[in-house]
Image (spheres, grey):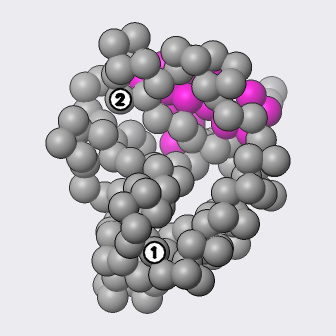
Amino acid sequence: MTAPVTYVRYQLSAPDPRGRHLGVFAAVNALRKHGRLTPEQEAFVERANAAYDAAYPDPTSVDPTVYDRARHPLAAAWFKDSATHLLTGIAGYLDLLDAHGLPWQRLRTSEPGRVVYEDEHQVVVTPHSTRSTHGAGSNHSTGSTGGTGGTGGSV
């Protein structure tokens, strides 16, 4: 009998106006797009994004409809917990969110939602219900948990 897969997601604690909790990459890239990063933060994001782009497929390059709002409302990506080489790099993104005062959550579950895309590292799912948060998680915000809340490399 094989053990169930556990999925991990890092996202902003507060939903956006459409009810979505932006994932860590989308949140950091939004800061970048709006010119809110320091030159050092910008350099980090450039390097880290390039490393992630090289390490795993962009779901939209395989299926352009994965994040289509009409077909897959509230679609969200979750890493498989076996993708440890990808999860260890998340700490730098979380530090950046902390530096900008953006509270985030780490979620873990074996049932993230209805799978609309899957590869060896991740799934993209739509929620089982209309709630935009899945599974059990822990909240983190600047100052209340000492940064990343100890999640660093052990996720």
Does the rendering let one see residue 1? Answer: yes
The stretch in magenta equals 106-126
Q: Quadrant of residue 84?
A: bottom right
Q: Magenta includes 125?
A: yes
Most extreme residue toward the left is 17
Residue 43 colored in magenta in the image: no
User: Quick one: label 1, few (<14), some, or many (20+) residues within 10 Å?
Assistant: many
**Rendered view: 110 above or below 29:** above
- On screen, 94 above or below 22? below
CB under 8 Å between discs 2 and 1: no
Which residue, given by chain and number where applicable, does mark 2 sit on? 74
Q: At x 34% / y 82%, what residue is drawn?
A: 142
Which residue is found at the position 47% from the left and 24% from the top? 67
Residue at 57% across, 72% down: 42
Q: Quadrant of the C terminus?
A: bottom right
- Tell me the kind of residue under disc 2: Leu
Specify whether residue 140 is in view: no
Q: Which mark is residue 37?
A: 1
Quadrant containing the N terminus is: top right
Which one is nearer the viewer's eye here, 18 or 4?
18
Q: Amino acid at mark 1?
A: Leu
Depth order, front residue of 68/20: 68
Q: Residue 46's spot in the image, x, y percent?
A: 66, 64
Nearest to N terminus: mark 2 or mark 1: 1
Please name which of the two marks, 2 or 1, marks the residue nearer to the observer. Answer: 1
Predominant SS along the magenta part: strand
SS at circle 2 = loop
